[in-house]
Image (cartoon, helix red, strand yellow):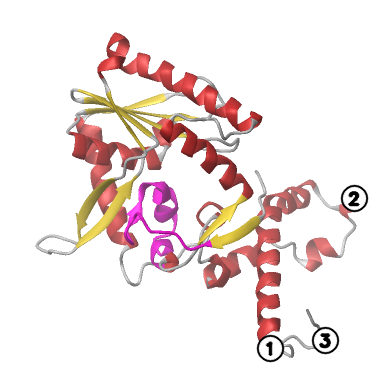
């Protein structure tokens, strides 16, 4: 698992227009209250994110001239993987396929039967190719790390539904191009029946995420990039629960820990350290506002 340092918070134009998105599909399923909790909060950028964003920007326009050596290698390999996938899906007709790069696909999800309110939901696939009633969606991942393969990837699942609906396709192939993991990614095929099932599941999740009283459920995956975690009670309780208890571990030399205790420490280290760092940062902010709010401590 990679650890990254948060560098800046940046207010950006919200292309999602306040709606849910395919990129958060898994996280919204795990925590229904996540979408509501993050509304109006500034985005957070990290060094790793910037590395990947620059490659994505180059892929979108086909110009790698501003990339460094490491980025260029990833860029070129993604191009090779994409070419192979295109041949697998369209064969010798690849030149006839229309390609969409970083186009946002949108849908309005009705609040319920007989209601007129629609919840906005969208997806912005990195690469979509369409020929006739067939489409190929490729999501570019520029870093190593655990990314669900196409058959289990909920982001791609949503993208398949939105692309099929807007481009009128009845077959949609999806794949993850992640060159630092594999050069031969698995593909997943959605037909008319599986697209309909995926659509219903997506609609249910979007409705649940837009409930004013949507329940928050903390966990490592859904909290890792959540913008609301710094003041979310559920996250605070979850993160603190991962800290080793003084009686069981902190009062015992590390060399005397059991195998289970060592495993517990490693399992919780990343989340617990993030919570400690974020709590310390919040205390510094409070001390700037009120130098007496933490007795015995100064900035």
Residue 255 numbered mark, or none: 2
Tell whether position 267 is magenta: no
Name the foreground residue: 60 vs 5: 60
Give the percent coordinates (x, y) of residue 13: 40, 59
Residue for point 75% across, 49% down: 260
Q: Around disc 3, counting alpha carbons within 10 Å, would you say few (fewer than 14), some (14 to 19), or many (20 or more)? A: few
| Side of 249 relative to 286 (left or right) | right
Tell whether position 17 is magenta: yes
What is the distance, in whole Å, between disc 3 and disc 2 at their CAs?
34 Å
> Does 90 appear above or below 150?
above
Q: Can residue 264 be seen in this snapshot?
A: yes
Residue that numbered label 1 is attached to: 290
Instruction: Locate the C terminus and report the quarter of the image it occupies.
Output: bottom right
**Which structural element holds mark 2?**
helix
**Which structural element holds mark 1?**
loop
Give the percent coordinates (x, y) of residue 207: 27, 59
Residue that numbered label 3 is attached to: 296
């Amino acid at each position: 698992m990679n650890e990254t340092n948060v560098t800046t918070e940046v207010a950006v134009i919200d292309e999602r227009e306040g709606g849910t998105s395919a990129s958060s599909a898994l996280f919204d399923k795990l925590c229904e209250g996540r979408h509501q909790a993050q509304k109006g909060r500034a985005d957070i950028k990290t060094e790793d994110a910037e590395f990947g964003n620059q490659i994505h920007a180059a892929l979108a326009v086909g110009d790698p001239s501003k990339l460094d050596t490491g980025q260029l290698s990833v860029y070129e390999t993604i191009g090779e993987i994409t070419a192979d996938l295109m041949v697998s899906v369209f064969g010798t007709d690849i030149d006839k396929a229309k390609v969409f790069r970083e186009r946002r696909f949108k849908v309005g999800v009705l609040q319920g039967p007989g209601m007129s309110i629609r919840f906005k939901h969208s997806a912005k696939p990195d690469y979509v190719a369409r020929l006739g009633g067939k489409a190929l969606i490729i999501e570019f991942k520029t870093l190593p790390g655990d990314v669900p393969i196409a058959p289990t990837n909920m982001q791609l699942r949503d993208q398949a539904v939105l692309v099929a609906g807007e481009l009128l396709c009845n077959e949609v192939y999806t794949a993850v191009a992640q060159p630092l993991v594999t050069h031969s990614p698995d593909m997943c095929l959605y037909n008319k029946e599986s697209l309909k099932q995926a659509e219903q599941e997506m609609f249910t999740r979007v409705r649940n995420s837009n409930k004013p009283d949507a329940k928050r459920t903390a966990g490592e995956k859904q909290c890792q990039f959540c913008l609301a975690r710094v003041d979310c009670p559920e996250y605070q309780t979850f993160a603190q629960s991962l800290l080793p208890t003084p009686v069981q571990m902190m009062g015992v030399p590390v060399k005397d820990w059991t195998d289970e205790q060592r495993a517990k420490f490693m399992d919780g280290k990343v989340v617990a350290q993030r919570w400690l760092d974020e709590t310390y940062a919040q205390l510094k902010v409070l001390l700037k506002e009120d130098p007496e709010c933490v007795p015995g401590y100064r900035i």
